[in-house]
Image: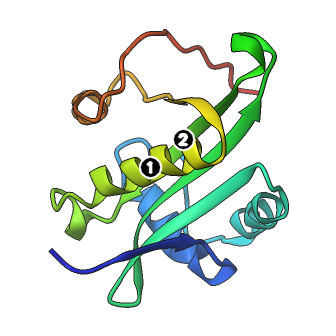
Amino acid sequence: MTDYTIRTARRDDVEAIVHMLADDQLGATRDDPADLAPYLQAFDAIDEDPSQLLVVVVADDEAVGTLQLTVIPGLARRGALRGQVEAVRVRADHRGSGLGADLLRWAIDESRRRGCALVQLTSDTSRTQAHRFYERLGFEPSHTGFKLNL
């Protein structure tokens, strides 16, 4: 496996991240690397918010993985913080290498370091391979999620 590092994403990583988002069964219908303007605007909002952490996995000076971690304060569970993991992606040529598992373990450790009592994520019901992946890492399919497109 290639050596890699996990670091906070920079604005110049956005294009590579968007390509990873679009190179996906669902992302192909939602994301478009041809117009980076909305992604750069979103990046700036994420980057300015201390509750948000967008990271990339870098191998050979290229972004080959990404995820976003959001720390959510709440009253439930005695005021516990939650780590919400979103948009986990590994570039196609690095899938199956263990990089994705290492990235999720990193997110779990970072959530713990930030004082979170639990880590949660959602996954589209059609992503059965992803569900098995998350379960192997200890996540339990404990809830049903609902979304309303606006």
Rendered view: 51 above or below 127? below
Quarter of image, res 10: bottom right
Rendered view: 36 above or below 54? below
Which residue is located at x 67 percent, y 71 percent?
Answer: 36
Q: Residues within 10 Å of mark 1 (few under 14, many from 20)?
A: many
- From the image, state whether disc 1 or disc 2 is nearer to you: 2
Element class at badge 1: strand
Rendered view: 76 above or below 136? above
Quarter of image, res 57: bottom left
Q: Residues within 10 Å of mark 2 (few under 14, many from 20)?
A: many
Name the outermost residue toward the bottom.
Answer: 61
**Nearer the observer, 53 or 41:** 53
Which residue is located at x 44 percent, y 49 percent?
Answer: 88
Decide if residue 82 is on the left or right side of residue 3: right
**Nearer the observer, 130 or 5:** 5
Which residue has dot 2 on it? 85
Q: Position of residue 123 (x, y in %)?
A: 43, 29
Q: Position of residue 79 (x, y in %)?
A: 78, 19
Decide if residue 72 is on the left or right side of residue 144: right
Which residue is located at x 32 percent, y 89 percent?
Answer: 60
Tell whether label 2 touches label 1 (CB within 8 Å). Answer: yes
Quarter of image, res 145: top right
Which residue is located at x 23 percent, y 67 percent?
Answer: 94
User: What residue type is disc 2 on?
Assistant: Val
Which residue has dot 1 on it? 88
User: What residue type is disc 1 on?
Assistant: Val
Rounded to the nearest angstrom, the CA distance separating label 1 from label 2 is 7 Å
